[in-house]
Amino acid sequence: MRQAVQLQALSDSPRLDVELLLAWVLQKNRTFLFTWPETQLTDAQQLQFNDAFNRRLQGEPIAHILGEREFWSLPISVNATTLIPRPDTELLVATALEIFADDAKNQQRKLLDLGTGTGAIALALASEKPAWQCIGVDRVTDAVVLAEFNRDKLSLPNARFLQSNWFDAVHIDNGGAFDIIVSNPPYIDPQDPHLQQGDVRFEPLSALVAEQQGLADIRFIVEQAPAFLQPGGWLLIEHGYDQGEAVQALFAACGFQHCVTRKDYGDNDRVTLGQWVAGEPVNTGGV
């Protein structure tokens, strides 16, 4: 496949990129390509493919070209206002489900997803746990609009989204605080050279970088989370491959217990979690 050769210097998966573009143009799944390899593109389809392929050659992410990325088997719509959901973030979802694996089927829980972006994390958990109340917040208005679009597209009424700079617009209602808070916050050092490489060049820097060697937003979340957690509630944060020890130290300094760091599919530190058992959360009013 000659197009894949052209993408080798740009992409970690050049053949997959071409297959995804072909399937998108044909409005078929990738299985169709293997089942009917002799299929010829029409002139209009060839023009559409050429345009999309040239965009990919310029470095534009496949997800932006297709307008969609699969996450937890859900078709999540994406655009340039948010991060593209990544496979490693599925570890956050899997870990949250593992924590409550012994719940009864209809056990109600309250979840808060900070910096929700496309809504992928909150929606994945809402799809697995229909009895949960899943709230996602984001500082960016366009991100909230996109998350709401994904919720409606996926018909997940147990998820809702609010505009909020972290906890600013989040309040504890009469039903109590949250059982679990999850977040994939900015955690890249502003000086990291990888910011000039690959797909991240097309993603909003505000969703990627944080001061204090990438730990500023994580520190803020860890320090503020106890006021919004039930006693016994959990905080889960995604972070960089080399930040596990530092994030665990932040958790411990704020009184979290049972802190542990989980590794992603590449065997890199990726998600740190801890349980809040130090005392009653602060009552901050009602949503």
Image (cartoon, helix red, strand yellow):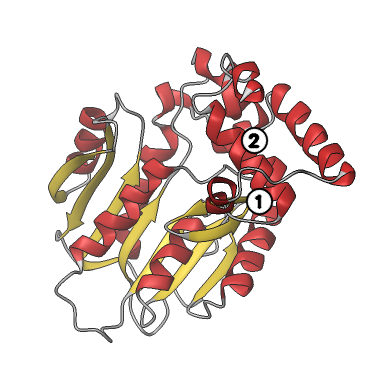
Residue 281 visible, this orientation: no
Residue 241 shown left or right of residue 127 in the figure: left
Indicate the amino acid at tag 1: Val
Q: CA distance from mark 1 to mark 2?
A: 11 Å
Of residues 93 and 71, which is closer to you in this image? 71
Q: Residue under circle 2?
A: 204
Q: Residue under circle 1?
A: 140
Residue 209 visible, this orientation: yes
Residue 131's quadrant in the figure?
bottom left
Residue 10 position, x and y percent, is: 59, 18
Label 2 crowd bin: few (<14), some (14–19), many (20+), radius 10 Å: few
> Vertically, is 108 above or below 20?
below
SS of the residue at dot 1?
loop
Of tags 1 and 2, which is closer to the observer?
A: 2
Label 1 crowd bin: few (<14), some (14–19), many (20+), radius 10 Å: some
For image coordinates 57% across by 72% down, the residue present is 154
Residue 228 position, x and y percent, is: 35, 64
**Label 1–label 2 contact, CB within 8 A:** yes
SS of the residue at dot 2?
loop
Considering every residue shown, the one lying at the far left of the view is 258
Residue 104 position, x and y percent, is: 19, 83
For image coordinates 28% across by 56% down, the residue present is 94
Indicate the amino acid at tag 2: Pro
Considering every residue shown, the one lying at the far front of the view is 38
Residue 173 position, x and y percent, is: 42, 80
For image coordinates 70% across by 46% down, the residue present is 39
Question: Of the residues under marks 1 and 2, which one precedes in the sequence?
Answer: 1
For image coordinates 46% across by 42% down, the residue present is 86
Residue 142 shown left or right of residue 259 in the figure: right
Of residues 201 and 236, which is closer to you in this image? 201
